[in-house]
Image (tube, rainbow, N blue to C red):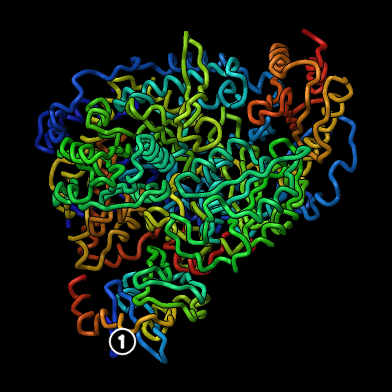
Amino acid sequence: MSRYIPNTQEDMEQMLSEIGLSSVDQLFTDIPEGMKLSRALDLPGSLSEMELSGLMRGLAKKNAHCGEYACFLGAGAYDHFVPAMVKQVLSKPEFYTSYTPYQPEISQGMLQAIFEYQTMICQLTGMDVSNASMYDGATAVTEAALIAVRSTGKSRLLVSQGLHPEYREVLKTYGKYNDLVIEEIPLRDGITAVSELDVMSGVKGSDGANAANTTLGDENAGKATTGKSDIAAVIVQSPNFLGAVEDLKWFGEFAASKGALSIACVDPISIALLEPPGACGIDIAAGEGQGLGNALNYGGPYLGFLAAKKAFVRKMPGRIVGQTTDNEDKRGFVLTLQAREQHIRREKAVSNICSNQALNALAAAVYMSVMGKEGIKEAANLCLQKAHYAAEKLFATGKFAKLSEAAFIKEFAVRALHEPIQAINERLLRHGIIGGLDLEKYYPKMKDCWLLAVTEKRTKQEIDDMVRIAAGGES
Amino acid sequence: MKTYQGIKYTREHEWARVEDGLVYVGISDFAQNALGDIVFVELPNPGKSLKAGEQASVVESVKAASDIYSPVSGTIVKVNEALEDTPELLNAEPYENWIVALEPENLSEMDALMDEQQYGDFCAKEA
Amino acid sequence: MADKINERQVNSIDNGRAELEDRRQIEQNNREQAMLIFEMSRDGRRAYSLPACDVPVKEGLIPDAFARRRDADLPQVSEVDVARHYTRLAGRNHGVDSSFYPLGSCTMKYNPKINEEIASLDGFTGVHPYQNEESAQGSLQVLYEMDRMLSEITGMKRVTLQPAAGAHGELTGLMIIGAYHRSRGDAARTKIVVPDSAHGTNPASAAFAGFEVVEVKSNPSGGVDIEDLKLAVGQDTAGLMLTNPNTLGLFDENIEEIARIVHDAGGLLYYDGANANAIMGICRPGDMGFDVVHLNLHKTFSTPHGGGGPGSGPVGVKKELVPFLPVPVVECENGRYWLDYDRPQSIGRVRSFYGNFGVVLKAYAYIRTMGPDGLKNVSELAVLNANYMMKRLEDSFDIPYKRICMHEFILSNKKQEHNGVRTLDIAKRLLDFGYHPPTVYFPLIVHEAMMIEPTETESKETLDSFVDALISIAREAENEPDRVRKAPYTTVVSRLDEVKAARNPVLKWGD
């Protein structure tokens, strides 16, 4: 019997006899005979721990990874520094083998850690309330959009093309099933073309979307403004997908002037240097928290964060930890505002989310505890300096052209004048470097364009090597 | 379980009474007891128009969030703003604390509601 | 009475748990309020370490208009502060590694350590999702083989690993059902039928996917009421969501008829795989007539719950629905793995990137460890353990469904309520015995329900210990009901004021 199944033949016989049965098969008589499997599952045979370890190490060896390659790839997932403390804390079985803290008396550890995480996200974003996590940046932005739809009773969304392409795809997928009208605002010179916005906001949605047009079951349409427009929200990312910093204050004011909500998708490291959404009049902040202490992990598990102004606290999806007292007046923490959630409200729930990304939020909390007020600024500053250094060096080779004058923090896009991106990336890989993203895949008009991320982990040597090899210095 | 003379009741445990041409709506003692400690009342905006049976408000406790349906068709004229800071008023005095007041389209809709006797019987069956 | 079981005796039976006196001491130590990390913060303290900037430093790279004016007030503490803080918090938390977690519907089985080690290999954690496929063949192989293995286990054609959790998988599966009907020009199918015993995520997901929810009643033996189902389905039915065994822990033997009724009406059948731990290697949802399935890797496949997540909710589909799977799909040709984006009928993306890869990896390792015979043993022992516990408890507690259960069973408080003892009180009293309570107040169709799922990773001694504790609480409920009603006594906090938390929410430090 597997080492994960303690009961022996003898135990089984004792238990069967207590029940009054003689064989395990008799426990499954409710299942129609014709429905039972008459063969073993066609799966590979069981492996011992050593064999499994050998197999998996072999698989891992087939990957190039950031431990051995210098990574200049970003686009929503970043090779940021993860302090040793994070792994230590996440390895504590009291945390990682624990369940959702529905029984608060024995879950005060996790509840407090998440309360601290919520606080830190609010500190970073300048918002009043944060939830305990969403699946990833894409679903966090999507849920933010749905909050706006529910609050305003409108169903039209204006979304910048600077929002991560995959986030826009997810928004479209969810939107299809919720009758949302999604219009994209184009980019110009690397940032959202705000002149287009004025034009777009004056035009009604293609089906003349009206205030009550939502199938989410929330009849709070009464809370809508006096109908300045039919827009539920304006969604912008800063720094945007191409790395450029957008003017969040402008979007906050613009949305408000149209009776719409503003949603900003922000980067949690870059935000240490930029005016946060809370200081820019933005209603809801969302984004990807992977950069806060979580590994790249081939795309997941990541960490969606969602934070908003106080007015939206009862409209936030997902779990939220609140502070309270016990009957001896001691401070304690509980999951609160659960009446909005699936296990109580069922089909009228604000969202269907149940499991979230709690352990990834814990990693983020540990990261933010270790880095602290000064450390996160310093990390962001290193990204800033190194990214600008890399850009300068690339332009100096004469082989790469600037695409935008916009300010950037840790990521920027360039055009290669001498070679297709694929060829550059292949050459870089041969030299132990993971090159940036070929942008044509996501923005068909951006031929030979390359998106590079430079984090605090990239050394001057790595950057110099990357520039030299990218420019064709080696074969 | 308290009931109140002279007011009408719905199958969803709302009560309704007419005063100065307006229909005042609240939740019954049965409802507040079933919900437990009320933590939040979601109030609609005045000016909203509703058909009989449409959701007027949501009353939230720790363990449930209950939709409050308008017993009659009409337009919401005012809401009880005291409930924003002190939702527990609905537990303490469910009949003294109305939630919304509507200008009714058709007062005869009140005839379809239960009186005290009928509601008492209805609750006895539900329990 | 001679056979009164006191707490000390019960504690000493269970493997590896401290004697009551020791535990009280530890609790005492932890009972001092754990400080919030912000309360420990002092200007100038630091725990971080970064190298000096090795490139020339430039000023004015950020325009004034965008530059942050007020720093984020993150805590400033030393490294030893961080280490002690989280150690203290861990001491105030309880996991499967601490003790038994008989949570019905959650499958809190043991989390194998080798899987943790494998998932932390640099060669897996350090791979960027946008690396070219040639440089990520190892990870792509894991995803592809997982698709194959889960397809075999469930009897489906293909499985997507994209959804991040069970509820996410439900949403994905329902979107696929919607897309399927629409592709056949059948736009009138707007309703999803859900049993009244269903988990809350079922109707929530259906509503989220734009459907109207129709509830169908359960019959007295806990299965779907066939007559009510016949009334509920029709031309507007997109599908029925079901779990089998159901949320009462019972296998619905009418499943063939249920499938026929729904399929005849033109609807599809969705399987909520939360209870898959009862049937692995014994029967498969695909063979029961289900068209779409989701699994919970953090339940059935041993990945850790992480205090609430991350999970993973793969979705499997029958052949006709494969074109609608989320994009990209991992394909394999001549031993080379690649991402297929060319899928015009796909529902699109339900999240960024490919899924919770780190979680999928652990489940992969688990399946490779167990093998086909091991998985069958898992289900056999899960069901045996549950039935054994139910038998031992049948005299002390009311058991609403008196028949062979599957991997979980339900008790109610009918025998205790005359003394005012509620299921909640029994749950809280169990905390004093060092156990996480079972699931309470679910499913909704059983009054004051307590749902117990032991899983296969527990020994007979642990089961006996837990049963003994429950029996002693039942006795207390008879003789000293107040003791049960005011529990717990030995936890770091006693019952918390949830009304206060909801009425005046304090959701961050400084609120």
Q: Is residue C22 visible?
A: no
Q: Where is residue C5 in the image (x, y as percent from the top left)?
A: 24, 52
Question: SS of the residue at dot 1?
Answer: loop
Q: Is residue B118 visible?
A: yes
Give the camera-side residue of C378 and C38: C378
Residue occupying the point 43% across, 54% down: A215
User: Looking at the picture, does residue A189 appear above or below residue A5?
Assistant: below
Location of the N terminus of chain A by quadrant is top left
Give the camera-side residue of B64 and C489: B64
Q: Residues within 10 Å of mark 1 (few under 14, many from 20)?
A: some
Location of the C terminus of chain A by quadrant is top right
Q: Position of residue A460 (x, y in %)?
A: 83, 25
Check the image and name the residue furthest to the bottom. Answer: B20
Residue occupying the point 51% across, 12% down: C336
Q: In this view, does A451 lie to the left or right of B91?
A: right
Give the camera-side residue of C322 and B33: C322
| Residue tagged 1 | B7
- In which image quadrant can residue A256 be found? bottom right
Q: Where is residue C232 in the image (x, y as percent from the top left)?
A: 22, 50
Q: Is residue C308 left or right of residue B110?
A: right
Residue occupying the point 38% across, 27% down: C322
Q: In this view, does A34 lie to the left or right of A339?
A: left
Give the camera-side residue of A250 and A198: A198
Residue type at mark 1 is Ile
Chain letter of mark 1 equals B
Q: Where is residue C213 in the image (x, y as percent from the top left)?
A: 32, 52
